[in-house]
Amino acid sequence: MRLKRLAVALTAVIGLSGCSFLEEVNGTLDYVNQATEYVNEATEFANEVPAMAEQAISDTQALEDLETRLLEMKQEIEAFSKLEAPSIAEDIHQQVMEQNDKALEGINVFLSNIENGELDPALLENTELFTTIQELTELSNQIQQLGE
């Protein structure tokens, strides 16, 4: 009888730890997918926005489109920032969060300049926003390796 209880308890412990492992693997894969999607969005943003900003200097519709795109990216960054990383991805997630903070600062500078009617072509050259987004996309290889 005692042996039977011990066997049941041992089976339960093994089963629970196995579930925990599977949950960790699934969590990691979910994170990798979400992070990859986010980095792809950031890359697309970095590719689009310089031309949009250049056009926005002389075109009010382009200015509105730029503002919309900046606000969308800001929401993407904020949504990703709420994502909880699995333990295996904590270091990479922290690096992404640091880049996100810099990107948000750059986006806020752009939005402030748009609101104040001061969108200047020199801003495009002096902003860290695009450098930050480029650094973020470089992290994508590390994120992809988590899923392998």
Image: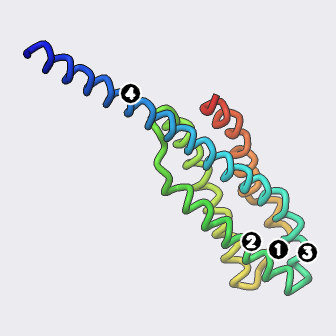
Choose the circle earlier in sequence order: 4 or 1. Answer: 4
Q: For mark 2, what is the residue?
A: 69
Choose the circle earlier in sequence order: 3 or 4. Answer: 4
Disc on res. 18 = 4
In front here: 92 or 7?
Answer: 7
Disc on res. 120 = 1
Please report contact status of discs 4 and 2: CB closer than 8 Å, yes or no: no
Instruction: Determine the residue positioned at 65% across, 33% down.
Output: 142
**Res 67 → quadrant:** bottom right
Q: Of the residues tagged 4 and 1, which is closer to the observer?
A: 4
Inspect the image, locate mark 4, and give the three-letter code of the amino acid beneath it. Answer: Gly
Disc on res. 88 = none
Apparent side of residue 112 relative to residue 101 in the rendered image (left or right): right
Q: Of the residues tagged 4 and 2, which is closer to the observer?
A: 4
Choose the circle earlier in sequence order: 1 or 2. Answer: 2
Inspect the image, locate mark 3, and give the three-letter code of the amino acid beneath it. Answer: Gln
Instruction: Determine the residue positioned at 56% across, 44% down.
Output: 30
Q: Residue furthest top?
A: 3
Inspect the image, locate mark 2, and give the three-letter code of the amino acid beneath it. Answer: Arg
Callout 2 secondary element: helix
Apparent side of residue 60 relative to residue 112 in the rendered image (left or right): right
Q: Of the residues tagged 1 and 2, which is closer to the observer?
A: 2
> Local crowd at mark 4 within 10 Å, few (<14), some, or many (≥20)?
few
Please report contact status of discs 4 and 1: CB closer than 8 Å, yes or no: no
Q: For mark 3, what is the residue?
A: 55
Instruction: Determine the residue positioned at 61% across, 49% down.
Output: 34
Residue 79: horizontal and vertical position, in percent? 55, 61
Which corner quadrant holds the C terminus?
A: top right
In front here: 5 or 111?
Answer: 5
Quote the CA–CA distance across marks 3 and 4. 56 Å
Which corner quadrant holds the N terminus?
A: top left
